[in-house]
Amino acid sequence: MNNQEIRQLIAEGKSALGIEFGSTRIKGVLIDYDGNVLAVGGYEWENHLIDGIWTYDLSEVETGLKECYRTLREDVEQKYSITPETYGAIGISAMMHGYIALDAQDRQIAPFQTWRNTNTTQAADTLTDLFQFNIPLRWSVAHLYQRALDKEAHVENVASVFTLAAYMHYRLTGQKVIGIGDAAGMFPIDSDRLDYNEGMVKQFDSLMEETGYSLKLRDVFPRVLAAGEYAGELTPEGAALLDETGTLKSGIMMCPPEGDAGTGMTATNSVAPRTGNLSAGTSTFAMVVLEKQLSKVYREIDMVTTPSGFPVAMSHANNGTSDLNAWVGMFREFCTLMGYEADMGTLFGKLYTHSLEGDPDCGGLLAYGYYSGENITFINEGRPLFARTPDSRFNLANFMKVHLYTSLGAVKMGMDILLKDEGVKLDRIMGHGGLFKTPGVAQRYLAAAVNTPVTVMETASEGGAWGIALLAAYLADGKKDGLLEEYLDNRVFSSLAGDAMEPDPAEVEGFECFTKHYIAGLEAEKAAIKAIDW
């Protein structure tokens, strides 16, 4: 389409807007109904460790929403000389899991606990034993039950518990609903009924009674919706919250709010059985859509769903690229010291590409980017750590390679359970997120880690914001094409370019060697946590 055609499309409201609250960036993407990106906006932010809790202030959530939309609106105005007044549909996505608690007057009554918090061990263990279903530390139900076990004063006043996506959707629409993929990070899902597992709901309600609280899970958790279902409309108050200029009209349809796992699956066309994807950012997680349930419960593996409700096995690592980004930042500081101003994009590209010259096993170097606890390795705190032996091949290429490898290290341990122990079949895995922005580097390392061909689309760096925009487009116009996977296959991805990379046998062997070092070195990480406590 030319600019005039796009301008007309925007004027008629035949576009879809997606906004995703990521760990370090809030991103907005405007697309047409075929998935073509028309405009983008963003806002940088970061979580804070306050009184031992990883959190964001909800006032900054609102500020970030406004700024993200402002920059997107200005991008539209600059490109097409039009200010958008309406859209076909809007979708909100965010980091999964966590705990936002409100009272009956919608007042926040406890700190927002993000997915990064691992202060729920007792609750997660108890619920896993009760349900015979893995309940990870970061799940919303674990947070709620832990607060009850700890007799926190606010629990008796809890009227609503949200994930961040469901909370922002509620602010924009007044509807207490959630997409099934995001709901699967709050409480176990029955994929046949597309709802919370009713037997487990009853078990949880009884457990809460034993702790002295009368709240019922269905009363406080949002109602579950699947992809393509109507999830309310933008209210006048929601429109004012989103667009401070007052230009945006209310009454716009909203799709179910989804978590970053669901939008990652959508953005990589990984919503059908035997497909998978890996999203790499502040956290790194791989997901495989299953043909059947796993043979037993694994504490290392989350069971969630696609936005349509198919069962998904997730290998989720709390720690992804934070430490890697910090090292690149230090190299930028060195460049400045030497009188050379290098932008971060150039540095990432140069350093990532240079890592390809490193040894397949990283030359014996070892690193852990543990800023926080790591569920897959059963470590509840984090200390970023770099180590080597005297005879390790210590050079820049290996140094960068080990930090790229280790961003996939914990995820690989979970994937090994699925692919090696459970024999899960995987026809393709697709990579997306900022880690894959430098062509042919992280893609190559992921192929080695899972010994499976890896495809990275041209849209890989757009990430989950594009994914939630696609889910909004599916509600607005895509359902006529059939199921979500049919809409994605036949309309969105049919013309998108993507390069598949086969695993190199030498690099597969090298990554296996690194993994042995990674597992053995976990004792050093545990010792660092114990010794470094200031």
Image (cartoon, grey):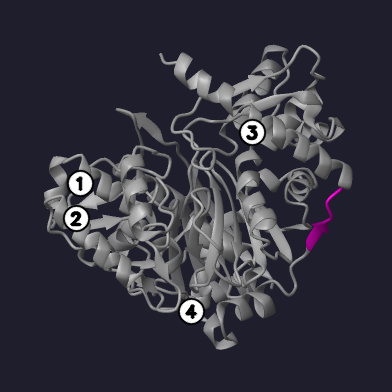
Tell which tag, 4 or 3, sits nearer the viewer: 3
Q: Quadrant of the C terminus?
A: top left
Q: Is there a contact, CB below 8 Å, between mark 1 and mark 2?
A: yes
* Region rendered in magenta: 498-504
Residue 148, disc: 1
Residue 208, disc: 2
Tell me the distance, in whole angstroms, between the alpha carbons under discs 1 and 2: 8 Å
Q: Which sits earlier in the primary sequence, circle 2 or circle 4?
A: 2
Q: Residue at x 77, y 11 (%)?
A: 390
Residue 476, disc: 4
**What SS does tag 3 mark?**
helix
| Amino acid bearing label 2 | Met
Q: Which sits earlier in the primary sequence, circle 1 or circle 4?
A: 1
**What SS does tag 1 mark?**
helix
Q: Which sits earlier in the primary sequence, circle 2 or circle 3?
A: 2
Residue 292, disc: none
Relative horizontal placement of residue 507, taking residue 328 as reference (left or right): right
Tell me the distance, in whole angstroms, between the alpha carbons under discs 3 and 1: 35 Å
**Residue 80 shows in this picture:** no
Graded by Cα atoms within 10 Å as few (under 14), some (14 to 19) or many (20 or more), the crowding at tag 2 reads some
In terms of image quadrants, where is residue 226? bottom left
Tell me the distance, in whole angstroms, between the alpha carbons under discs 1 and 4: 41 Å
**What SS does tag 4 mark?**
helix
| Amino acid bearing label 4 | Ala
